[in-house]
Amino acid sequence: MLDERKATILRAVVTEYIETAQPVGSGHVASSSEINVSSATVRNDMATLEAEGYLAQPHTSAGRIPTEKGYRFFVDQLGGPGKLGATESQQVRSFFSRTHGEMEQMLSDTSRLLSSLTHYAAVVVGPQLEVATIKSIQLVSLSARIVLVVVVLSNGSIEKHTLELGADTEDLVINSADLRLSSLVVGQTLAGVGSVDLNAAVLGEPEDVSLIIRTALTELRGGHRHDDQVFIGGTSDMAASFDAVRTVSEILRILEQQLVVVSLLEDVLDRGLSVAIGRETGNEALADCSIVVAPYIVDGETAGSIGVLGPTRMHYDQALSAVAVVANRLGHTLSEG
Amino acid sequence: MLDERKATILRAVVTEYIETAQPVGSGHVASSSEINVSSATVRNDMATLEAEGYLAQPHTSAGRIPTEKGYRFFVDQLGGPGKLGATESQQVRSFFSRTHGEMEQMLSDTSRLLSSLTHYAAVVVGPQLEVATIKSIQLVSLSARIVLVVVVLSNGSIEKHTLELGADTEDLVINSADLRLSSLVVGQTLAGVGSVDLNAAVLGEPEDVSLIIRTALTELRGGHRHDDQVFIGGTSDMAASFDAVRTVSEILRILEQQLVVVSLLEDVLDRGLSVAIGRETGNEALADCSIVVAPYIVDGETAGSIGVLGPTRMHYDQALSAVAVVANRLGHTLSEG
DNA sequence: CGCAAGCAGTCGAAGGACGAGAGTGCCAGC
DNA sequence: GCTGGCACTCTCGTCCTTCGACTGCTTGCG
């Protein structure tokens, strides 16, 4: 499609623009790269590149700026994540050797790590609960009419639901319900709870016990929506890399909607991409942004995804490496547990 | 201190500046307020107000801008939160009638409510776990060497800790440890766990059981640090009310540090204030910001605090009312549960 | 003495002129 | 097919001027 020299020129323009945020002119490219042709030749090629949609001019007699198509070419020819710098990979290593304990804490810390590596906003989407099996279910009575259902899942996360009962209920009743529930759902997935036959479930139990069981199961089924946990870090870094408050505010508005963020990442992954540039993100408000994503794999299965969000002129190579390495290590660490 | 007319003038300047973000001149004040004096007189008074530190001039021949002292006077003479507007109080009412269920979810939603009411960033600090008593403790074995300690507290929140055991452990052993732990800590506060005598705790138990008990108790003691949960909403609104990206980025950096946020709010409350203006916040990076805070009370005790963070030129009356009403209703709702 | 009216002075914001600089497109020639 | 040269374009910074919005002060009036 593009001959060797045009590709090199395009590469040079993109790199330079990412570095300086200034339109880059033919002179710069001619002098500061491995091309040994004159600026006039570069000019001709740049005109072609513009005609083919890889570059754009903010105005006549200014240098060129990469278009989304230009960035896309640049990213594609990078051909996957490279090596991480020495200090960065040291940082990753020390993070994962130090980290332990709660998954939530760890995912949240991971988003901080990722943003500190890349200086962009980092998003970490927690494992989907649906695939995990139920290890334990327990009813805890908080007050006469309030009962907490605590479900422990095989991946170490916890689902909880508050039940408000219509009438005061004795501990004995709660215990019976607890036992029955355990035998019903332990070993199932959360999704599997949906297929439990409500009527069969309460067969032979007294009225008050069966009421609790019904309520608890219904709650568990309804809980599907806030399945995904999202951890976001580095919004301040993100803000610093834009120059219009308006843009920053719009991006923050997106990031505040966790559902949108999750589907954003998943859309990108579904399309088989690891980078979405500008409008490729599918979100008009992110026209000036790019997203770099990777899934992480726990015990052989894709568990969740991580990503960074920055300006279209982001350091793609660094971001790609950072995301890849962190996703890899994160999956590894979670698999051990 | 300030005679009636000077106070009125100061009030007028502050209101006007909050509205327009433009320095306000003597002409404006003279024409657009209940003062019936000429602009020349206003000018004289404004000169005095400036000399006394209530107003400042960006440059000669510009209008006046309130100083922190000016805002402080303005806020003090407001004398506490007023009524909320009709639509806003409708919004609050419908929110609290609709809301139910998980505390985390509710606090997070509350931060969204508060930011949507005020159009500033909203901070909700969750109840301190230390005062809650332990309702139940349970050990769940996730794999041969990994055990999850799940602690249910009386306020409905959950603490969990992962234990990594040195050797494969049978369920029987875990069950014994579970029983012993329950008898030890149920009914205590989390802080109270600290005073349990480790040696007495494991008296008479076999080696493997006592190891688990020790590990679990130690973990629970160490867990004190991430006590407070912080929920932040409306960062996009906050961003929109500043005009320098730099400022926004710095504020976001503060908000990313949950510990800092918590102590920020508590410092303000400790000083007996409900509003901190500019440097009163005690944080240099928040020189252009003000914070409005209120504690919320659950079952007669101060449980946590909520607040909004906006520019020094914020709508103090609205913010004060919103924070007061929401804190009140939140405390109420949590008390019922 | 307090207030108002008038007036001179100050300063920033807005707008226009202008040159410098960076970059382009194109053409002719090697 | 590449290059040097050249004319042209457009932005940006600077300078200048004008305009307008203020202020501070002085003076006069009740």
Image (spheres, coloured by chain):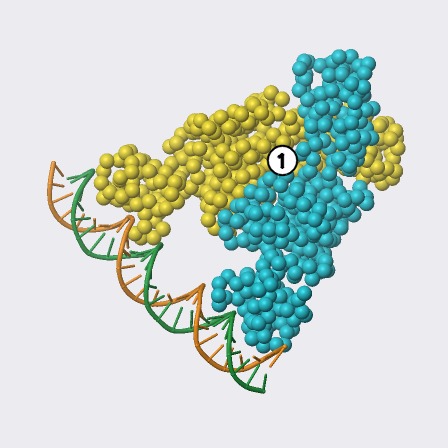
Chain colours: A cyan, B yellow, C green, D orange
A216 or B42: nearer the viewer:
A216
Residue B271 appears in the rendering: no
Q: Residues within 10 Å of mark 1 (few under 14, many from 20)?
A: some
Q: Nearer the viewer, residue A305 or B281?
A: A305
Tag 1 residue: B229
Q: Could you tell me which residue is drawn at 51 percent across and 41 percent down?
A: B237
Q: Position of residue D6 (x, y in %)?
A: 46, 80
Give coordinates of residue C20: x percent, y percent: 42, 73
* Residue in the foreground of this view, choosing between A308 and B246: A308
Q: Position of residue B53 (x, y in %)?
A: 35, 44
**One can see residue B96 in this view:** yes
Subunit under mark 1: B
Q: Position of residue A252 (x, y in %)?
A: 56, 44
Residue found at x 58% / y 59%: A67
Residue D19 sits in quarter: bottom left
Q: Nearer the viewer, residue B96 or A7?
A: A7
Residue at x 80%, y 14% (from the top left corner): A205
The reply, left or right, for residue A292 in relation to residue B204 is: left
